Amino acid sequence: MIINQKVSDILEKQFPGSVIQPEEPQNDYIQLLPNNWNEIAKFLKKETELKFDSCQCITGVDLGIEENLEVRYNFHSMKHKHKIEIRIAVDRKRPTIPSVEQVWRGADWLEREVYDMYGVRFKGHRDLRRMLLPEDWKGWPLRKDYKTPNIYNGMKVKKVRKGWD
Amino acid sequence: MGLVHADEMTLNIGPQHPSTHGVLRLKVKTDGEIISEITPIIGYLHRCFEKHCETLSYEQIIPFTDRCDYIAAMNNNFGYVLAIEKMMDIQVPERVKYIRVIMAEFNRIASHLLALGTFGLDVGAYTPFLYMFRDRERILDLFEITCGARLLYNYMWVGGVSHDLPVGFVEASYRFLDEFEKNTNEYHNILSYNKIFIERSADVGVLPKDVAIDYGVTGPNLRGSGVKWDLRKDEPYSIYDRFKFNVPVGKGTMGSVGDCWDRYWVRAEEMNESVKIIRQALDKMPRDGDVHEALPKKVRPPKGSIYFRTESPRGDLGYYIISDGKGGPTRVKMRSPAFTALSALSEIATGWMLSDVLVILGSLDIVLGEIDR
């Protein structure tokens, strides 16, 4: 996966200081700062050498209560047939990140799902609502510090029994 | 058409509606009969797949992947086990590789049969549905003699498959393929070239190429828009590089490229390509070998993450798996192809008549179990 190094170099040249250089050399992903993510995204899509025209997957990640939340993007280019993974860490207390919904239309629902499960606010998203859960749901279920509520809308939530019986 | 302006009316299609292929609600704003806005509302089938995965071990997740896309459960197993095998660097025996491809392609045919049959139902053709279910039933019979289940198989395991092929499976498969190839002509006669069907689906719900890519639409829906993109060809996984087959794309035979008929046609053609693959796989498959040979004692992928995609009948099915070296994953995210296809619905369907919405929805071939997970 040489493409990662190439993309990383191009981004460093175009947007100095936005790429967080890894401690050990690795080729799996590129870690970015969230600040000018929207401009970088537009650049990734437009630049003739890169042409990442398809947003494959957006994954929210919570690696533990002490750690930051993370949003991971998998992009793919139909033209050049290469792909990259981009990771952006967001603060757990105030999780905001620029939205790329207007860059790739497919990111619309994918971002809404991350918001639904992790509470990451995508700044600039035109329709940031819950995706899979009901709109009156409280909390962000896939975060590690999420506690299942005892009561939902006046209904008692059944305790899950341990084990399979 | 633009002269008459009736009052806008908001209309709900679903959550319980025979044409929504599951539990889906469409909030439709209509201007007379023309649709001015359409919002899909999903989540009625949400079963917390991703939350469950965090508490389960890797082997226990396989049955859950079955239940995500219950129409093509084999393909869902396939992507998941390949991802884990890649993380753990397991080499499976040759026979297992062939068995998996055969099963996946059989399931693709079964899934497309259901998709085309219900698409016919959506436009009011009842007979083709029954014809197609006749053939689908025979594929399910083949699955049943292999692993005992007809819909949710839990067949592919990390490092192997649950059961070896039973005696007589290969012969039965050949018999089925011979008859199926004749039957496909029958489908073309009763549905594909049916005048009413063409009137309802050709030139309706056109999805242009660039819009499809922008939305991340994949699979037959993308190929219907004329993009030659198939992971089996462009990014071969498993042993797909050993087979000869074509990638059919929409050409606008009946209307314009990317209309409902093209999406239908791509699926119909893909079934023939799957037949080709199965034939080659049956011919080349090693006749003996232990399918449990490479099963690992413990499924514990090393620390790290992987994003792995396979071509399911609905498109690029991706799994994002993060492992921290324990017996269960930290995170499993499923990138569902039907999810992205449905997100494009509002783009495709706006401006069409109310009766066309169900045709467009049928042509996208969505499975709500996979969208809501």
Image (cartoon, coloured by chain):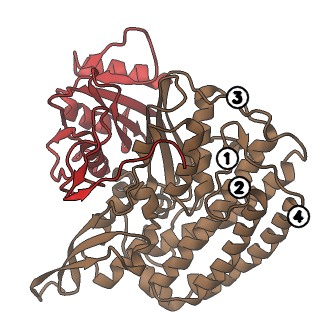
Q: Residue A139: percent from the left, percent from the top?
A: 21, 43
Name the foreground residue: A105 vs B327.
B327
- Amino acid type, mark 4: Glu
Which label is found at residue B156? 1
Distance between the alpha carbons at the discs numbered 3 and 2: 25 Å
Bin the neighbour count of mark 2 within 10 Å (Cα to Cα): few under 14, some 14-19, many 20 and up. Answer: many
Disc on the earlier residue, 2 or 1: 2
Pointers 3 and 1 within a single chain: yes
List the residue tagged with mark 3. Answer: B297
Circles 4 and 2 in contact, beta carbons < 8 Å? no
User: Which secondary structure lies at badge 2?
Assistant: helix
User: Which secondary structure lies at badge 3?
Assistant: loop
Q: Where B259 falls versus B122 (above or below)?
A: above
List the residue tagged with mark 2. Answer: B103
User: What is the quadrant of residue B257 in the picture?
Assistant: bottom left
The chain painted brown is: B
Q: What color does chain A have in the rendering? A: red
Disc on the earlier residue, 3 or 2: 2
Which label is found at residue B171? 4
- Amino acid type, mark 2: Met
To which chain does the residue with label 2 belong? B
To which chain does the residue with label 3 belong? B
Disc on the earlier residue, 1 or 4: 1
Which label is found at residue A50? none
- Amino acid type, mark 3: Lys
Distance between the alpha carbons at the discs numbered 3 and 1: 16 Å
Pointers 4 and 2 within a single chain: yes
To which chain does the residue with label 4 belong? B
Bin the neighbour count of mark 3 within 10 Å (Cα to Cα): few under 14, some 14-19, many 20 and up. Answer: few
The residue mark sitting in front, 3 or 1, is 3
- Amino acid type, mark 1: Met
